[in-house]
């Protein structure tokens, strides 16, 4: 069994219009939501073996906030430039390249690619992964190279504005 946790970066700032998109930081809400969502995962007992993040500032800051809450060293986050605005095919390629020894993989990225991937791999349609949304899926295969375009079992779907049940 393998578990894949997709995380869209937290809310980013548009205060400095001269900044390149890749360099945009988190805004106040993003800085609040990222640690809160990491804490929610930690309360569920989530302990990823590997965190992979887009190289964009907002995605990497989100990943670091999650890592701290989940007990993963932030310096161990694997940064993948190709995840920045990646297509579904590029995201699948990145995931399929992960070592088979990794049981739980956490991937931090961007829309529309993450929403498209969620809809390809998840059991239900999600119109839009909100900022800092978390989709936790489980698959019945032994190696990431075996990830196919099939639905995984949804373990959790959470986002900052979701009302807890």
Image (tube, rainbow, N blue to C red):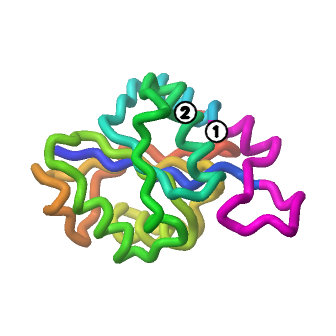
Tell me: residue 116, above or below residue 45: below
Q: Is residue 27 left or right of residue 45?
A: right
Q: Is residue 100 left or right of residue 40?
A: left
Q: In the rendered image, which residue does mark 2 sit on?
A: 38
Label 1 with label 2: CB-CB less than 8 Å: yes
Question: Quick check: is 85 in the magenta stretch?
Answer: no
Residue 12, given in percent of the width and then of the height, sits at: 74, 54
- Magenta-tinted stretch: 13-34
Q: Give the residue at x 15% y 41%.
A: 101
Q: Position of residue 10 (x, y in %)?
A: 66, 49
Q: Nearer the viewer, residue 133 or 164?
A: 133
Q: Residue at x 58, y 52 (%)?
A: 59
Magenta residue check for 23: yes
Q: Which mark is residue 13?
A: none
Element at label 1: helix
Residue 8 % position (x, y): 56, 55
Q: Nearer the viewer, residue 52 or 152?
A: 52
Q: Nearer the viewer, residue 140 or 114?
A: 114
Residue picked out by circle 1: 34
């Amino acid at each position: 069994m393998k578990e894949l946790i997709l995380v869209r970066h937290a809310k980013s700032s548009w205060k400095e219009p001269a900044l390149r998109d890749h360099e945009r930081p988190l805004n106040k809400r993003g800085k609040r939501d990222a640690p809160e969502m990491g804490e929610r995962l930690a309360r569920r007992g989530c302990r990823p073996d590997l965190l992979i993040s887009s190289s964009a500032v907002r995605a990497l800051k989100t990943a670091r906030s999650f890592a701290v809450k989940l007990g993963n060293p932030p310096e161990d986050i694997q940064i993948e430039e190709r995840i920045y605005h990646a297509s579904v095919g590029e995201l699948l390629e990145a995931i399929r390249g992960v070592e088979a020894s990794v049981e739980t993989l956490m991937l931090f990225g961007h829309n529309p690619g993450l929403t498209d991937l969620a809809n390809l791999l998840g059991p239900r349609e999600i119109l839009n992964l909100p900022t800092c949304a978390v989709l936790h899926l489980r698959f019945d295969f032994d190696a990431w190279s075996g990830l196919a375009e099939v639905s995984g079992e949804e373990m959790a779907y959470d986002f900052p504005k979701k009302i807890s049940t």
